[in-house]
Image (spheres, helix red, strand yellow):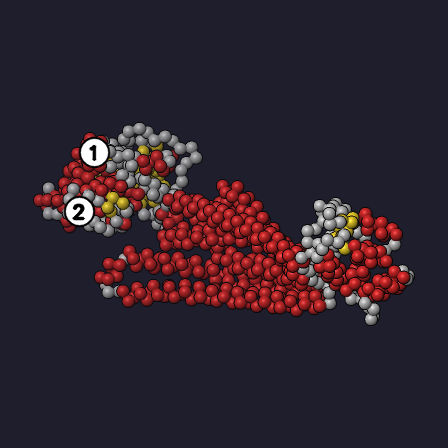
């Protein structure tokens, strides 16, 4: 899977942008629980008041506070607050008109002693101890200021049992009472605070959503582009494969690797760029946040350990199965491809039931394994959900106890719950990714098996330039053996073909005719000896240069979806209308193309299924003739043609060859097709049994005679 990441290199700017966007999203997402905590704690619980020190105090309360402050503390208070009358522009509009003390702009917070004095004065004004009402209490303090020390000592004794959070709550409650005393609308203050914090949360959520959308878009675009390049590389590499490599990878497997396997890699790259970056960032950052709450962190720690153990078990169970899944997909593709291609044969032998059972077995095996893997993944989801629910319950239970004893605020408990959820979800996402990575790793490995397979036929490091014009072609003591075969298919083949000559090959089935012809365009490379073009070994030219001068017609006519014209121009996209017309006439295809409704623009379906076998073969011949080639190869091309069409085609082809001086190689089964060739080479079990003109071989070659007499009469053979 790591190798697949190199395809992200051209998209490094996008990758950096994705990382930045994911980081921004994480920071915004992690800011939301803190704002939610502020709304619950300060907005709802404290009524929108955030500071235990009031912004304004009534003159009456200030006069009461002075009983509990020393001269230096009174000076500190007066340095922090200043009296403001109703006529002053800074006087609060909602106040009742009496003089208030307002906090000076830019002043530092008052001392703890001032804060304490305010709290004692406020508590005594709202809930005095004993039977004495507030007015009597303040009158007694006015008459006997020494009472203040006793009251302060009693307050200190009572406050010792308060936690910091409880003490802060009491102070803020007194501030709220003071604001009500002055006439400030505390309900509006609360609503304004909640609205302000809520709008900030909405803005943060919007920014996080925009960052998430942008990163998702870039991740999908980057992964798609990377896998597009990967498919291009696979296809390019497969195009360079020789038959030796194709024997290593089946066609069905190559299709699976190019489509399904690349899709798996694309999916995991998208997730890695988006989710795999997001989950660890969110998880670890949230983990640092929750460490502030040590009393609850242990619960989360055990949950994370459980998730890691579950992840390891799942990974161990699934990775061997994912390897088998891709092999089963190969098998299913192979069976499906064989059945679609051989549908007519299947119907002809009434073997539909057998093939249905064969397909059903491949399909059922894949289905059963996928069901097993899906069940494993299905078990993980409820287990993870159970762990998350159990952790949430424990957090609420422990947190409620902490709130009850004053060690934690409700908002802090809710923030911790959200951070814990972020951590657990992040680990759950990572667990899911770890389940998907094995399958994608298997797919990536299969892809790079293709990409890292070096073709056995390759271009030379210092290629020679192809000589101009038609050249002599020489097979110099050529022998050939298929990869891993024990015996040579061709043995010591030597002959020369001059420009303008027609060389034909004939022999029994399996004698090596097609193999010999396929050595010239380097579909295979010779095992021994050499094939020379203009006196130069063809292995010293690039494959592209060599094949550019060859017009090739395979044994089986192959047409591509498109039109007649697009198939003819497949050989030379710049071919003129005159060239195409001549190719159609020489190949004897003009007669049926002219009868088509759209002529040369007639659509051709995939594989040429809307034309007959003979028409397909003639169009294949026309395609090769559309190319201005120096060498033409016809690999048993004329066998699908009737004798009359065969004769007309050979006659037209001979005229064309005389004009172009091209060299022609013909593999044939029929004597009538090749008896007028300049040279006939008779192959028998991979060796040359005879070569020469028809008349010579009828006298000297026994193998040729047997073939000839089995097909034609003596009169037809000219004997």
Residues tagged 2 and 1 counted as in contact (Cβ below 8 A): no
From the viewer's side, name the closer residue of 374 and 101: 101
From the viewer's side, name the closer residue of 50 and 363: 50
Query: Relative to 705, does residue 317 appear above or below in the rendering?
Result: below
Indicate which disc, 2 or 1, sits on the residue closer to the N terminus.
1
What residue is disc 2 on?
641
- Tell me the residue at 33%/31% (across/down): 535
Query: Relative to 425, does residue 533 appear above or below in the rendering?
Result: above
Residue 9 position in % (x across, y down): 51, 42
Whole-angstrom CA distance, mark 2 to mark 1, is: 25 Å
From the viewer's side, name the closer residue of 524 and 630: 630
Which quadrant of the rendered structure holds the C terminus?
A: top left
Which secondary structure, mark 2? Answer: loop
- Tell me the residue at 55%/66% (across/down): 385
Mark 2 or mark 1, whichever is nearer to me: 1
Residue 598 position in % (x across, y down): 19, 43
- Give the left or right position of residue 88, taking residue 636 as reference: right
Circle 2 residues within 10 Å: few <14, some 14–19, many ≥20: some
Residue 253 position in % (x across, y down): 39, 54
- Residue 698 seen in render: no
- Residue 95 seen in render: yes
- Give the left or right position of residue 304, taking residue 593 as reference: right
Question: Looking at this rendering, what residue extends furthest in the bottom direction?
Answer: 131
What residue is disc 1 on?
578
- Tell me the residue at 53%/57% (across/down): 433
Which secondary structure, mark 1? Answer: helix
Residue 586 position in % (x across, y down): 18, 38
- Tell me the residue at 89%/63% (across/down): 147
Residue 306 image-quadrant placement: bottom right
């Amino acid at each position: 899977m790591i190798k697949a990441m190199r395809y992200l290199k051209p998209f490094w700017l996008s990758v950096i942008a994705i990382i930045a966007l994911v980081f921004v999203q994480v920071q915004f997402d992690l800011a939301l629980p803190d704002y939610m905590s502020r709304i619950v704690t300060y907005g709802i619980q404290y009524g929108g008041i955030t500071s235990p020190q009031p912004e304004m105090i009534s003159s009456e309360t200030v006069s009461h506070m002075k009983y509990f402050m020393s001269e230096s503390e009174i000076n500190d208070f007066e340095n922090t607050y200043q009296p403001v009358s109703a006529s002053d522009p800074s006087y609060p509009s909602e106040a009742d008109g009496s003089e208030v003390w307002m906090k000076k702009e830019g002043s530092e917070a008052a001392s703890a002693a001032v804060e304490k004095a305010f709290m004692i004065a406020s508590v005594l004004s709202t809930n005095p101890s004993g039977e004495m009402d507030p007015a009597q209490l303040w009158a007694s303090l006015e008459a006997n200021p020494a009472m203040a020390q006793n009251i302060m000592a009693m307050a200190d004794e009572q406050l010792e049992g308060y936690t910091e959070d409880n003490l802060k709550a009491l102070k803020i409650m007194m501030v709220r009472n003071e604001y009500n005393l002055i006439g400030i609308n505390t309900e509006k203050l609360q609503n304004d605070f909640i609205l302000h914090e809520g709008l900030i949360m909405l803005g943060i959520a919007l920014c996080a959503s925009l960052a998430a959308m942008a990163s998702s878009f870039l991740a999908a675009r980057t992964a798609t582009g990377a896998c597009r390049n990967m498919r291009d590389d696979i296809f390019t590499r497969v195009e360079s494969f020789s038959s030796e490599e194709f024997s290593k990878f089946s066609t069905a497997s190559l299709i699976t690797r190019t489509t399904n396997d690349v899709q798996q890699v694309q999916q995991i790259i998208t997730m890695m760029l988006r989710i795999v970056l997001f989950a660890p960032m969110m998880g670890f950052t949230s983990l640092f946040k929750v460490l502030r709450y040590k009393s609850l962190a242990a619960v989360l720690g055990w949950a994370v350990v459980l998730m890691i153990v579950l992840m390891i078990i799942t990974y161990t169970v699934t990775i061997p199965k994912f390897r088998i899944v891709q092999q089963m997909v190969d098998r299913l593709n192979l069976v499906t491809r064989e059945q679609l291609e051989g549908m007519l044969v299947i119907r002809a032998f009434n073997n539909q039931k057998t093939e249905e059972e064969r397909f059903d077995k491949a399909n059922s095996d894949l289905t059963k394994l996928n069901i097993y893997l899906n069940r494993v993944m299905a078990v993980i989801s409820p287990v993870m959900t159970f762990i998350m629910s159990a952790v949430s319950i424990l957090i609420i239970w422990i947190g409620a106890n902490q709130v009850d004893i004053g060690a934690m605020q409700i908002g802090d408990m809710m923030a911790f719950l959200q951070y814990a959820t972020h951590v657990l979800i992040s680990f759950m996402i990572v667990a899911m990714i770890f389940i998907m990575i094995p399958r994608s790793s298997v797919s990536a490995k299969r892809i790079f098996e293709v990409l890292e397979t070096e073709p056995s036929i390759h271009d030379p490091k210092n290629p020679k330039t192809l000589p101009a014009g038609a050249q002599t072609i020489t097979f110099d003591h050529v022998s050939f053996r298929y990869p891993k075969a024990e015996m040579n298919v061709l043995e010591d083949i030597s002959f020369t073909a001059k420009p303008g000559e027609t060389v034909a090959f004939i022999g029994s089935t399996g004698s090596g005719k097609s193999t010999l012809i396929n050595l010239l365009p380097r579909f295979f490379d010779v095992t021994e000896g050499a094939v020379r073009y203009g006196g130069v070994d063809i292995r010293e030219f690039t494959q592209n240069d060599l094949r550019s001068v060859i017009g090739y017609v395979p044994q089986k006519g192959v047409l591509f979806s498109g039109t007649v014209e697009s198939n003819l121009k497949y050989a030379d996209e710049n071919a003129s209308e005159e060239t195409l017309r001549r190719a159609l006439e020489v190949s004897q295809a003009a007669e049926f193309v002219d009868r088509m409704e759209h002529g040369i623009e007639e659509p051709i379906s995939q594989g040429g299924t809307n034309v007959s076998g003979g028409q397909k073969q003639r169009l294949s011949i026309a395609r090769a003739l559309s190319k201005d080639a120096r060498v033409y190869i016809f690999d048993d091309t004329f066998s699908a043609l009737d004798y009359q069409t065969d004769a007309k085609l050979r006659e037209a082809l001979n005229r064309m060859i005389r004009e172009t001086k091209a060299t022609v190689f013909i593999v044939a089964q029929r004597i009538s097709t090749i008896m007028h060739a300049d040279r006939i080479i008779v192959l028998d079990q991979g060796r040359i049994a005879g070569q020469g003109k028809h008349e010579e071989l009828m006298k000297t070659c026994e193998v040729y005679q047997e073939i000839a007499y089995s097909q034609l009469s003596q009169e037809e053979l000219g004997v």
